[in-house]
Image: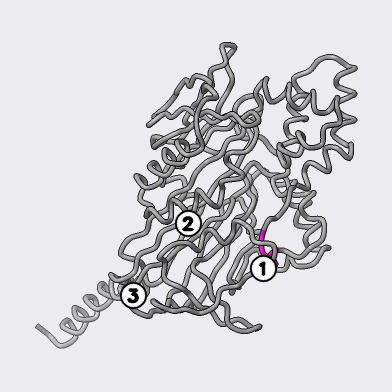
Amino acid sequence: MKPRLQFCVVLALLCAGLPLLFRAQTHSSDQHLTAHEWGTFTSIAGKDGRAAEWLPLTGSTDLPAFVEHLQAANFKGGLRGTVRMETPILYFYTNRETTVSVHVSFSQGLITEWYPHANRVEPPGLQTQARMIAYLQDWGRHQKQPDGSISWDSLQLEPGSSAALGKGEPANHYYAARETSSTPLRINTPAGEQTEKFLFYRGVASFSVPVSATLADNGRVLTRNSATQGIPAMILFERRGDKLGFRIAESSETESALDAPELNASMDSLKQAIENILIAQGLYRDEAQAMLETWRDSWFEEGSRLLYIVPRGIVDTVLPLTIQPAPAQTVRVFVGRLELVTPATERDVEQALARHDRRTLARYNRFLVPILERMLADNNNPTVQAQLRQYLNSPLALDAQSN
């Protein structure tokens, strides 16, 4: 072979191998590393059964003071969406000290809270009120919202570390997520070191959830799955005062009809059923228990709702996750929560409003306004409509949302 031809062949082979070499260098993996994540997508069903627009950031933040969040004043009141992404918790497990980086994108969403300190939260520059107002105005004009994201660089995973974790008063359900065997992590920030048992973030978004639910005249709940993947499990839950009930549907490819549950179940049986479902999806037992403890007061509060396992493909599409080096295994289990406005809920709210019963209204807290909006849309009586509009702007509704 002539020298020039030989050189060209060698160069061609090197060029062909460069992409493989580049991928091998930039997409390294760690066979000692495992990542597990759980979270919740919360929505409220509109009259057509699909997730309706609402103000998902109303209500108490119920987070420790050390958690970071957008600082702009009054942004909660202007950020409408279809989904409140609540408390994704990302755990790591490894038997040796290592450094990882994490990037999460949020389709049509905005990251609103996080901990520990993140290196980047996109879109940037929303820490001032003026920029936040401009962003909210832009958000309202877009049919498809821009994607947000959050990144942590150089997280130090330290097996066996006993570093002190942040605490705040009063104690709240944030701390329940720490009750696992996950590997502690540490990150250096401009204000000093922060340590935690997981990565935490929250947000709000405008996308279509995979499940819709409508109410039949016979009291059944009719569900429809719009995803290409089946829904692994669904639970129809209802609570009225001290009585509760639930009904489980193991799997749904397209449509299901669930009878209203009888209100004769115990909290222990409900928790065990959900724990078993979460473990079947890949969570460790202590992770499933931590998730249940975190959402004990919210999932099982007054009213009716559909809880379902979000298909993994939907989670990866809405929240693309990149971890470097790549774990040997990554488990992501998200529960969809679709709040239902049933006739029983409407009657309860209507009677509470008539009695000025703040305690009962507070049970519906952040969902009270969308419930009233739904009642207003369903009613054709001008007198009742005027009363509902008055209630929507009354201190009763505002107080309930702040609880």
Depth check, front residue: 69 or 150: 69
Q: Is residue 193 magenta?
A: no
Whether residue 272 is situated above or below residue 351 in the rendered picture: below
Q: Which residue is mark 2?
A: 320
Question: Which comes sooner in the sequence, label 3 or label 1?
Answer: 3
Question: Which comes sooner in the sequence, label 3 or label 2?
Answer: 3
Q: Quadrant of residue 13?
A: bottom left
Q: Position of residue 394 (x, y in %)?
A: 89, 36
Q: Nearer the viewer, mark 3 or mark 2?
A: 2
Q: Secondary structure at mark 2?
A: loop
Q: Which residue is mark 1?
A: 168
Depth check, front residue: 106 or 10: 106
Label 2 and label 1: CA atoms lie apart by 31 Å
Amino acid, disc 2: Pro
| 10 Å crowding of disc 3: few (<14), some (14-19), many (20+) | few
Please report the bounds of the magenta region as a residue range: 63-69
Amino acid, disc 1: Gly
Label 3 and label 2: CA atoms lie apart by 22 Å
| 10 Å crowding of disc 1: few (<14), some (14-19), many (20+) | few
Which residue is pictured at 49% across the width and 27% down the height?
224
Question: Which comes sooner in the sequence, label 2 or label 1?
Answer: 1
Left/right of residue 342 with respect to residue 396 in the rendered view: left
Magenta portion: prevailing SS class: loop
Amino acid, disc 3: Phe
Q: Which residue is mark 3?
A: 22
Q: Position of residue 351 (x, y in %)?
A: 79, 23
